[in-house]
Image (tube, rainbow, N blue to C red):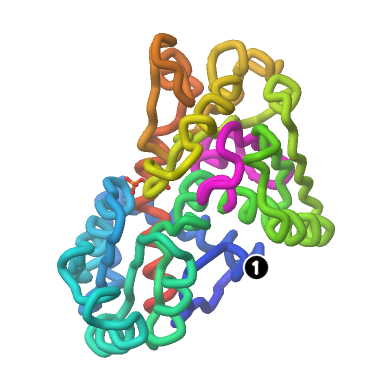
Amino acid sequence: MPMNLTGRSFLTLKDFSPEEIRYLLDLSRDYKSLKRAGIYPKRLQNKNVALIFEKSSTRTRCAFTVACADEGAHPEYLGKNDIQMGKKESIPDTARVLGRMFDGIEFRGFEHSVVEELAKWAGVPIWNGLTDDDHPTQVLADFQTIEENLGAIRGKKLVYVGDGRNNVANALLTGAMKMGMHFTIAAPESLFTKNDLQDWAFKVAKQTGATFELERDPLKAVRGADAIYTDVWVSMGEENKPGIQERVESLRPYQVNSKLMAATGKRETLFLHCLPAHHTDGVHDMEVTEDVFESANSKVFDEAENRLHTIKAVMAATLT
Ligand code: CP
Ligand code: NVA
């Protein structure tokens, strides 16, 4: 179905209807096939794209850069020490300057309010490349990966195990509610989704047929799961926060290992992770064991590749 997303920012999946998310997933699937066939539609010719990164990135940065190169746009990387924003220049002023020169701006940083303020002032689409609260481009790649392996996402059971209130967990919850999935977070109660997002999720679930559960017991949570997802226990920018060691200790029972995978009762359950991951041998237990990470059920590198195709779809849909 043709869909007009031209000029829209991509800050959170909350702002997009299920039909619009479906459109982006279909466009991404098409871009992947075209690239496999050596076809580059060059839909972004003569576009200039700013990539602002206040935090490190491998996948997101490279996906935006390669997507620009594939489609004929020029990407300009602006690291945290390269521009005046937040030091000598305000966010509204920076947004208005960049908006006069660039056709679209990616931002990765800390407070979610910054990406919202950029979108308010820039006059061109802003794409959220990760904030402390959200990571919407990641979820498109995750959903594409699930569909490639298991078919339509609607009705699938996705269980996120670990730090249940980080950016990736929030973004997955948002996307899952929009797309009518059965989403469970397995975490200690102290790391359950914040109340305002919980309220939003339950409200949207009623409209879309999705379900949302919060569960302390990881073995119970994963029963019947089509996909198990985890992420790091300490996100970027949290390394020196008070209480971080206690948090890591509280998450040890939530490691994704072969016992947890077996507790799904299904042989084909996918293992997903946004990456970068700490995959360990059982000596230094972190979020996933080496055997699960390297197993045939693990689709983490498909997810990583799909960041390219989904980000290309988001840029093409909002810029042209
Ligand atoms: N998954 C993800 O966003 O990876 P990067 O931090 O490497 O961009
Ligand atoms: N939750 C992680 C995701 C990295 C892609 C972080 O914010 O560091």
- Residue 179 visible in the shown view: yes
Q: Estimate the x, y position of residue 208 in percent, counting from the top left.
A: 78, 58
The residue drawn where x is 29% and y is 65% is 41
Vertical side of 120 occupied by 17: above or below: above
The residue drawn where x is 39% and y is 37% is 275
Seen as rendered, the residue at the extreme front is 242
Span of residues in magenta? 145-170
The residue drawn where x is 65% and y is 68% is 17
Badge 1 density bin: few <14, some 14–19, many ≥20, Cα 10 Å:
few
Vertical side of 203 occupied by 74: above or below: below
Seen as rendered, the residue at the extreme left is 82
Q: Estimate the x, y position of residue 5 in percent, counting from the top left.
A: 50, 76
- Label 1 C-beta lies within 8 Å of the nearest ligand 1 atom: no
- Residue 6 visible in the shown view: no
Vertical side of 315 occupied by 311: above or below: above
Circle 1 residue: 17
Indicate the amino acid at tag 1. Answer: Ser
Judging depth in this view, the residue of 269 and 187 nearest the camera is: 187
* Quarter occupied by residue 222: top right
Q: Quadrant of the C terminus?
A: bottom left
